[in-house]
Image (cartoon, helix red, strand yellow):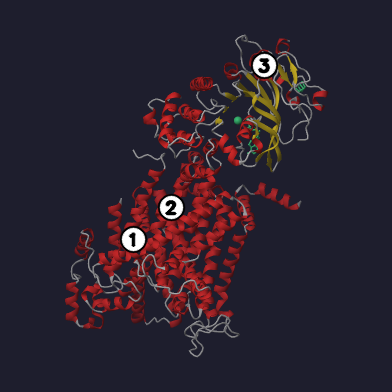
């Protein structure tokens, strides 16, 4: 709130086609906070982000940097004492932060759907999976119970659950983690939403299943021409699935741009660190990889200046005092006083 | 601060246990309802000891010229249908409630601990028998069973007393006959209420036996008694104290219930339950005769429940009910 | 599980009855019991001259045969006189002497009373529990839980008269009290409320705990993320999971109501099964008393069993293999 960092909304600047499009979702200066006994936790602290029709945007960052809270702010489902205290989230001409409960109910599940991280706990144990899929369609698509059932069976088939008819009346305890996530995906796609928020949909799954689930989401999103916010902390997933990527640190965005640009030419030391921890094809055994030391900052009392300086190998006095704003570098934008290509850091 | 220093000193001189009890006491003292319970308990003890000296009347003393009176200067709480002073009878009822509560609690605790521990330590058929007995006792509607046992038991006690009188010339004065009632209630309630504590003690022992540190100590050659004294007793004491407190209130309530049904304390003796049933016919004309013993009974039962709850929160913080 | 428990319960009640306080022959004969000839005659008629084991086997036979024996009042004499004189109040059908008919007839009244208490509990106590959970750790929560403790701690024979005094004397809402005039009479209201106060705390606490546990669960968030109306989120996704412990405890509560209606029946002079038990215990009509105790034990054991089954039916995670 007190910080007046990058106030200007992010403007489309990348590939020519995107420049003409209006963003489907526009997050402006979002501040999401938790009031706790220890003080105000700034989970999201002045985040601005645009999502364009039909694109898949990856949102990356270490655990605890505010990715989930960003998604939950969009959904209006912040837990307990969490509040989106300032900013705006514009979607289809409405500011979601100011929508009434009734309006939000129409948007949730109907226009914006979310896939959660924990398939083991995110489904109701005392309800058949079939009903859990069909109930949203009864509401948003005004289908009868029978019609919703038929659609749910198709969806189950579509997300790759064998013998859907037999599985329809099962409970989740009879499903594996991967299967549960397929059910979650079926629920999310059931009402043909315009926007999908996928919060680390594969993190909790076995490595062998991860790729399948990822492919499933990609395929379904492509078929439906859906816009998606893909939250992950895995740069490999970003490389394989996303069009653009936004990097978050301590509740704010530090770098954003087309995937190719950001991954091949990361500007921000934090992004470089994140990438450094992913061995790439070029890296030979013995290469020293730069990875980030230290811990993420305490969100109750953030450092002054650049929030990354306590962990940044390049930090100097200016970094400690002045906060850098997002600036354009080539096709992507980064917030750092000392932007430089990755090779210079690694190459010595 | 000196308080801090002494607390630290304690931490060093006494291992964990002491500070656990201190924590518990502090927490208990922060619970206003539990404080109320402590106050009620102390008041009950005081009144049951000194009650007879607090009032100028005898609790059996009738005055047929002054029956069913409301509160007045010489009868603060009025008089009942036989002109007996209500306050005096309520004070004596406190003695009855407390003494019965005490002996029944001792009885059920001893029986429960012995049977529960026997089942857990000896296992095999002993354990099976104890658990079976508990199941069966539980299967009975408890107040009916207690009523039945007290009717049966009363007959036996009276026969025995008559036998003593004929054989040895031991007589029992009218005023002391109430102790026979205590005996009857003690017998019936102990037989009906022992199983809760038995299950508790058995469960505690069995769960503790599973714990690794016990196995480790056993492997190191610690004797059964060392383990019992150093782990079992401190660990089971909390739940047992809670159970005893709640059980004490429960026993007093059961005494009142049996007396209300007419199978507990017999008429000239004073019991709150007996007073309620005795005056029940007067509810329309002299409501205070029913309400007063009822309110006193309610306060005492509530006090012990609050205290039990508070102790539970303080002593077993990991399984807090609220 | 069921049969052996019942047999042992029978054995215990029978033994207590056999060595019991009131000689059935004396109960039947009253003043005449000193006449040795009459005494022997009645003793033979009651089958009491046979050895203990034979009597017990015979007793088991009559119980399992579905004919639960005869009330002592069938043999005339004091027991029956007393039963009649005790049987004041409306609604008594004191004519039958078959234990089964007596028990079942009275049970019907207690069951109706318990039914109302249960209705009162499910509506009122569950609502309070949900409210306390939603307002967790506020004054409202605290007030609800504390007042439930108070309501449940105080015995029916204190609450009953107090409510009588309030709602008949102070604010005359009810005119006729006591006795039984069918399930749908105004007389049934007060006793049902008093009966319901007993298990109130259990239900409030269970509901509260169940809802509190579910409130922060991920699956509730998923349900909200679907855009379901809050009503459906609570009804479909929260209540069912939260209510499993409540519903299972409702089973126990029901048997508790049936066996615990004793005091309410005594206070309001309702000829239910508890009143029958006390009457026959006092008059020495053991066949009937034992019938009541056995029947109630049967209810308790069956409900415990049903509760386990119900739990399995409600919670899909529990499977029987
Ligand atoms: N209920 C809460 N109370 C206080 N702080 C919270 C709460 N939930 C999340 N946070 C804080 O918000 C920050 C962002 O969390 P989150 O968005 O879940 O991170 P992630 O990027 O891993 O998804 C975390 O550092 C956490 O400390
Ligand atoms: S601004 Fe300074 S501290 Fe921040 S990332 Fe850039 S170099 Fe590091
Ligand atoms: Mg997260």
Callout 2 crowding tier (Cα within 10 Å): few <14, some 14–19, many ≥20? some
Callout 3 crowding tier (Cα within 10 Å): few <14, some 14–19, many ≥20? many
- Report if residue B183 is visible in the image: no
Q: Give coordinates of residue B29: x percent, y percent.
A: 64, 58
Left or right for A331, reference A151: right
User: Residue A209 versus residue A105: which sits nearer the camera?
Assistant: A105
Disc 2: which residue? C249
Left or right for A238, reference A120: right
Disc 1: which residue? C296
Disc 3: which residue? A262
Proximity of marks 1 and 3: CB atoms separated by less than 8 Å: no
Spatial CA distance of label 2 from label 3 is 59 Å
Which is closer to the viewer, label 1 or label 3? 3
Q: Quadrant of ligand 2?
A: top right
Which of disc 1 and disc 2 is earlier in sequence? 2
Spatial CA distance of label 1 from label 3 is 76 Å
Name the outermost residue toward the bottom.
Answer: B65
Secondary structure, mark 3, is helix
Q: Is residue B107 above or below residue B51?
A: above
């Amino acid at each position: 709130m007190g910080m007046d960092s990058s106030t200007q909304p992010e403007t489309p600047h990348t590939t020519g086609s995107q420049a003409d499009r209006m963003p489907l979702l526009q997050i402006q200066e979002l501040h999401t906070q938790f009031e706790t006994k220890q003080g105000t936790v700034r989970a999201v602290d002045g985040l601005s982000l645009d999502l364009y029709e039909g694109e898949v945007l990856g949102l990356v960052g270490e655990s605890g940097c505010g990715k989930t809270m960003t998604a939950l702010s969009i959904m209006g489902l912040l837990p307990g004492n969490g509040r989106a205290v300032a900013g705006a989230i514009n979607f289809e001409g409405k500011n979601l932060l100011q929508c009434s409960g009734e309006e939000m109910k129409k948007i949730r599940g109907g226009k914006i759907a979310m896939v959660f991280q924990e398939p083991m706990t995110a489904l109701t144990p005392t309800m058949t999976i079939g009903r859990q899929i069909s109930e949203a369609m009864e509401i948003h698509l005004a289908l009868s119970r029978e019609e919703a059932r038929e659609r749910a069976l198709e969806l189950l088939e579509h997300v790759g659950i064998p013998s859907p008819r037999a599985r329809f009346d099962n409970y989740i305890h009879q499903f594996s983690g991967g299967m549960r996530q397929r059910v979650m995906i079926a629920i999310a796609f059931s009402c043909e939403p315009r926007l999908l928020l996928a919060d680390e949909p594969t993190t909790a799954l076995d490595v062998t299943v991860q790729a399948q689930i990822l492919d499933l989401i990609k395929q379904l999103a492509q078929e439906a021409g859906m816009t998606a916010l893909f939250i992950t902390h895995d740069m490999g997933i970003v490389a394989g699935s996303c069009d653009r990527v936004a990097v978050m640190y301590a509740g704010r965005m530090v770098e954003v741009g087309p995937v190719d640009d950001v991954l091949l030419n990361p500007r921000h030391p934090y992004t470089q660190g994140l990438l450094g921890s992913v061995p790439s094809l070029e890296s030979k055994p013995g290469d020293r990889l730069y990875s980030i030391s230290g811990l993420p900052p305490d969100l109750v009392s953030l450092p002054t200046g650049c929030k990354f300086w306590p962990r940044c190998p390049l930090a100097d006095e200016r970094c400690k005092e002045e906060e850098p704003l997002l600036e354009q570098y080539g096709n992507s934008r980064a917030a750092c006083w000392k932007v430089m290509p990755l090779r210079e850091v690694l190459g010595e | 601060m000196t308080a801090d220093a002494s607390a630290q000193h304690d931490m060093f001189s006494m291992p964990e246990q002491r500070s656990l009890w201190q924590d518990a006491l502090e927490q208990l003292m922060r619970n206003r309802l539990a404080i109320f319970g402590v106050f009620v308990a102390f008041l009950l003890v005081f009144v049951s000891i000194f009650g007879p000296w607090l009032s100028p009347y005898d609790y059996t003393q009738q005055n047929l010229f002054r029956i069913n009176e409301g509160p007045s200067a010489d009868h603060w709480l009025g008089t009942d249908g036989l002109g007996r002073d209500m306050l005096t009878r309520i004070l004596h009822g406190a003695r009855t409630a407390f003494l019965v509560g005490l002996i029944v609690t001792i009885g059920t605790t001893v029986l429960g601990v012995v049977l529960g521990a026997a089942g857990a330590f000896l296992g095999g058929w002993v354990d099976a028998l104890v658990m079976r007995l508990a199941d069966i006792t539980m299967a009975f509607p408890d107040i009916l069973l207690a009523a039945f046992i007290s009717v049966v038991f009363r007959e036996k006690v009276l026969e025995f007393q008559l036998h003593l009188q004929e054989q040895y010339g031991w007589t029992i004065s009218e005023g002391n006959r109430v102790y026979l009632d205590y005996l009857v209630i003690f017998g019936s309630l102990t037989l009906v209420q022992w199983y809760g504590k038995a299950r508790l003690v058995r469960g505690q022992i069995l769960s503790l036996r599973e714990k690794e540190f016990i196995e480790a100590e056993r492997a190191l050659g610690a004797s059964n008694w060392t383990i019992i004294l150093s782990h079992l007793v401190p660990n089971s004491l909390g739940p047992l104290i809670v159970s005893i407190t709640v059980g004490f209130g429960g026993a007093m309530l059961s005494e009142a219930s049996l007396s209300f049904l007419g199978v507990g304390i017999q008429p000239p003796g004073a019991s709150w339950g007996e007073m309620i049933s005795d005056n029940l016919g007067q509810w329309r004309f002299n409501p205070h005769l029913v309400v007063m013993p009822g309110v006193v009974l309610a306060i005492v039962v509530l006090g012990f429940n609050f205290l039990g709850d508070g102790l539970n929160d303080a002593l077993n913080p990991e399984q807090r009910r609220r | 599980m069921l049969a052996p428990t019942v047999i042992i319960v029978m054995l215990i009640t029978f033994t207590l009855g056999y060595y019991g306080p009131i000689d059935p022959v004396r109960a039947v004969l009253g003043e005449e019991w000193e006449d040795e000839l009459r005494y022997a005659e009645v003793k033979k008629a009651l089958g009491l001259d046979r050895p203990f084991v034979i009597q017990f086997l015979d007793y088991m036979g009559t119980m399992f045969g579905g004919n639960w024996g005869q009330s002592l009042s069938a043999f005339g004499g004091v027991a029956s006189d007393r039963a009649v004189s005790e049987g004041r109040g409306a609604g008594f059908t004191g004519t039958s002497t078959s234990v089964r008919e007596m028990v079942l007839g009275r049970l019907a009244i207690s069951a109706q009373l318990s039914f109302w208490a249960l209705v009162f509990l499910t509506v009122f106590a569950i609502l309070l529990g949900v409210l306390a959970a939603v307002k967790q750790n506020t004054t409202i929560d605290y007030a609800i839980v504390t007042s439930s403790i108070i309501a449940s701690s105080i015995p029916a024979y204190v609450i009953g008269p107090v409510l009588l005094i309030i709602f008949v004397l102070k604010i005359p809402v009810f005119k006729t009290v006591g006795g039984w005039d069918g399930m749908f009479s105004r007389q049934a209201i007060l006793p049902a409320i008093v009966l319901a106060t007993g298990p109130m705390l259990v239900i409030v606490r269970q509901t509260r705990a169940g809802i509190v546990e579910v409130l922060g669960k991920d699956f509730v968030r998923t349900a909200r993320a679907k855009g379901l109306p809050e009503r459906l989120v609570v009804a479909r996704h929260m209540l069912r999971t939260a209510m499993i412990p409540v519903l299972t405890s409702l089973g126990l509560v029901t048997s508790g109501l049936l066996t615990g209606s004793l005091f309410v029946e005594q206070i309001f002079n309702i000829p239910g099964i508890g009143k029958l038990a006390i009457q026959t215990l006092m008059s020495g009509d053991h066949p009937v008393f034992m019938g009541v105790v056995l029947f109630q034990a049967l209810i308790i054991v069956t409900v415990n069993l049903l509760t386990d089954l119900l739990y399995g039916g409600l919670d899909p995670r529990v499977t029987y293999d």
